[in-house]
Image: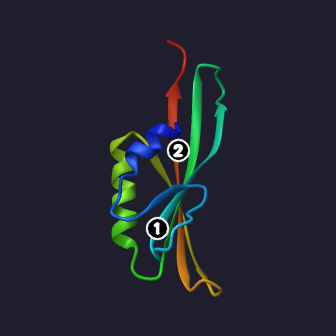
Amino acid sequence: MESEIKKILKLDVPVAHLRYKGKQKTYVVWTIIDEEPNFSSDDEITDSEVVIYSDSNYLKIMSSIKNKMKENDWTWDGDSQEFFEEETGLYHRTCSFKKGRYING
């Protein structure tokens, strides 16, 4: 799943897994939250979280991420929260996505 997300999240801003170590003020960090079988051993649900950090308007980036994830069969779960970090001066917005997969056959 990680390689799939890396391919999907080709954006105009830096994208990093877990932690961004660069110097740009607008960037995206993503992680896989959970990968576990659903009610049947044949199905697997994967949850991922994408976080946008920015000191300016990030709505275009958020829209692009949602579109790219949707095009690749990920579903936005409607959960999205915005925070402002006083110490960094950055806004950050979390977006959670899910993808079900049939793993046998």
Task: Give the x, y percent position of residue 103.
Answer: 54, 21
| Label 1 crowd (10 A; few <14 / some 14-19 / many >=20) | many
Left or right of residue 44: residue 24: left
Task: Give the x, y percent position of residue 95.
Answer: 52, 60
**At x 64% / y 30%, what residue is drawn?**
38
Residue for badge 2 = 98
Q: Amino acid at mark 2?
A: Lys
Which of the two marks, 1 or 2, is nearer to us in this view? Answer: 1
Q: Amino acid at mark 1?
A: Tyr
Q: Nearer the viewer, residue 47 or 77?
A: 47
Left or right of residue 69: residue 20: right
| First along the sequence among labels 1 and 2 | 1
| Label 2 crowd (10 A; few <14 / some 14-19 / many >=20) | some
- What label does residue 27 carry, if any? 1
**At x 37% / y 66%, what residue is drawn?**
61
Secondary structure category for the residue under label 2: strand
Compared to residue 7, the image places residue 38 above or below, namely: above
Q: Nearer the viewer, residue 62 or 10?
A: 10
Q: CA distance from mark 1 to mark 2?
A: 21 Å
Left or right of residue 49: residue 76: left
**At x 53% / y 79%, what residue is drawn?**
91
Q: Nearer the viewer, residue 79 or 72?
A: 72
